[in-house]
Image (cartoon, helix red, strand yellow):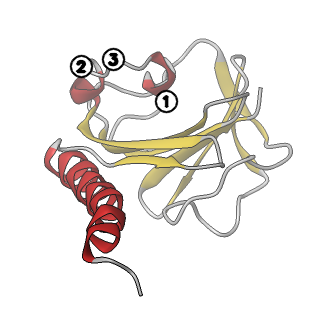
Amino acid sequence: MTSPRIIAARRGPVLASATAAVTLTLAAGLSGCALTDEFGSHQKERVFATAADVSSEADPAFVPPSFVPEDATDLKIRVITNGPGDILRYTSATAIDDEYCAPGTLVGSPLLESTWWPAEVPTEGIVCGSGWQVFDKDGNTYAWASV
């Protein structure tokens, strides 16, 4: 028969773990941006209401490329934390105006997936010298970099 002290001792770590998980979930939800760090996948995701909100981001992995316009809204950025590979999505009325970007053929596919990333990627879009490939779909601009 298991003594009440042993049962109570076993509950302590379980309750502490559950409390920590709930606290982390609430903290991420209250911070105003989505935060995902999937254990084992080495991926993180952030959501920003505006491009200006990104400037307060401390993690340089989430600084968007220079072609993202200042009026961009609903920015979603997903990165691989242990190597190259980023995807992003934003909404903007401003066309890409970057001296390093030009219309071209999109090659390959992103290394990442997300629920907000479209199922099909077009073959034509905008290619940027910084390794980003960009396309518009359904009123949003999508981009990925695999380098």
Which label number is shown at residue 56? 2
Q: Quadrant of the N terminus?
A: bottom left
Residue at 36%, 35% in the rendered image: 94
Q: Quadrant of the C terminus?
A: top right
Q: Residues within 10 Å of mark 1 (few under 14, many from 20)?
A: some
The reply to whether the C-beta atoms of the residues labelled 1 and 3 are less than 8 Å apart is no
Separation of disc 1 and disc 3 at Cα? 25 Å
Please tell me which residue lies in front, 32 or 107: 32
Secondary structure under tag 3 reads: loop
Secondary structure under tag 1 reads: loop
Above or below residue 69? Residue 117 is below
Residue at 39%, 81% in the rendered image: 2
Above or below residue 17? Residue 111 is above
Q: Residues within 10 Å of mark 2 (few under 14, many from 20)?
A: few
> In the rendered image, which residue does mark 3 sit on?
58
Of callouts 2 and 1, which one flags the residue occurring earlier in the amino acid sequence?
A: 2
The reply to whether the C-beta atoms of the residues labelled 2 and 1 are less than 8 Å apart is no
Quarter of the rendering containing residue 120: bottom right
Which label number is shown at residue 96? 1
Residue furthest to the left in view is: 30
Please tell me which residue lies in front, 19 or 1: 1
Give coordinates of residue 20: x percent, y percent.
27, 51
Quarter of the rendering containing residue 145: top right
- Name the amino acid, label 3: Ala
Please tell me which residue lies in front, 72 or 18: 18
Above or below residue 15? Residue 29 is above
Depth-wise, is mark 1 or mark 3 nearer the camera?
3
Of callouts 1 and 3, which one flags the residue occurring earlier in the amino acid sequence?
A: 3
